[in-house]
Amino acid sequence: MSDTTATSRPLAAPVLSTRQRVLRQLLRDKAAMAASAVILLLVLTAVFAPLIVALVGHGPNEQFRDTGLTAGGVPLPPGSLFLLGTDVVGRDLFVRLVVGTQVTVFVAIACALTAIVIGVVVGMLAGYRGGIIDTLLSGFVDVVLGLPLLITAVALVSVYGASFGIMMGTIVFFTWGPVARVVRNLVVATKSGEFVDAARMLGASDTHIMVREILPNIAGQVIVYGSLLIPQVIVLEASLSFLGLGVPPPTATWGGIIAENQTNYAVAWWSILFPSLFLLAATLAFNVLGDGLRDALDPTVQRSR
């Protein structure tokens, strides 16, 4: 009798960790999975860009004035010789977009990670310490956020010249401030928790409390914000390159490619369309993935589903 009753009882659902719940929620989100596939394709393209260029056999800055332009000097449309056509001076557009993907992915990841690290450090110090430290750091963040991006970029380029380092420094300088503000607010809301009081009563240092107690509790929100920061960095890099304030030519970037061919769109639409599609796909993919991460980390969304 007892054996029959025991076997008829439904098995309890396994208890999932936070990481497992988030992963399961993401796997159920078709839009987030599609965005992840696009991001993975972009990363693989960036990693294997030299191999792709070698297989095509066209250099990113190589001008094919005899085979890449018509007799009237018009770029060639997409075809078997040039998969996505050529640009205004007869360069292979596909190869330049592949190399531009390498630049864009590197700049996006490096600048976003740097901005997040700086923002987390400043935000945690301001939110945990409070007082005069919070006032000074928050005031500095307000000053940074109040500076005009384009005027600052133009001033830096006029003094030091356009370069890879100046562009990355400018992007980081104008993106760490919002991260610091978000982290500061999260720390202020978290530091009053009982687990923080317990750690303090056990003699834990301030550094231990910030790194081992508070940071793991806000890491999810920081990760979500970081995923949404990457498309902002991509747009900033493309905008600076388009305005001539980014990577100097002839290095291929998506924004630079659009700028080089902006006066040629009437006769060579592909030279504007394809880099614009690359830019749209990258920014949309990271935004969709960020939305998926936010929903996966939100317990109210998980309960409703």
Image (cartoon, rainbow, N blue to C red):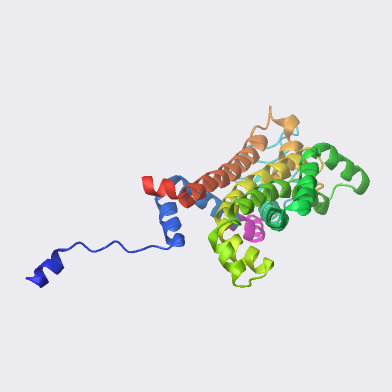
| Residue at left offset 85%, top offset 47% | 162
Q: Which of 294 and 277 is in front in this view?
A: 294
- Quick check: 275 above or below 264? below
Residue 128 position, x and y percent, is: 68, 57
Q: Nearer the viewer, residue 54 or 6?
A: 6
Farthest left residue in view:
1
Farthest front residue in view:
201
Q: Inspect the magenta stretch and tell me whether residue 47 lies in it.
A: yes
Asked where in the image residue 194 lies, by quadrant, the reply is: bottom right
Residue 113 position, x and y percent, is: 68, 57
User: Is 264 on the left or on the right of 222, as rendered?
Assistant: right
The answer to whether residue 68 shows anywhere in this view is no
Residue 17 position, x and y percent, is: 42, 63
- Quick check: 132 above or below 264? below
User: Is 205 on the left or on the right of 198, as rendered?
Assistant: right
| Residue at left offset 62%, top offset 39% | 274
The answer to whether residue 304 shows anywhere in this view is yes
Asked where in the image residue 69 lies, by quadrant, the reply is: top right
Farthest right residue in view:
159
Q: Is the magenta stretch mostly helix, strand or loop?
A: helix
Residue 81 position, x and y percent, is: 62, 46
| Residue at left offset 76%, top offset 45% | 174
Q: Which of 188 and 21 is in front in this view?
A: 188
Which quadrant does the N terminus fall into? bottom left
Specify start and end residues of the magenta stretch as a single range: 44-57
Q: Inspect the magenta stretch and tell me whether residue 145 lies in it.
A: no
| Residue at left offset 66%, top offset 53% | 105
* Count of numbered circles in the view: 0
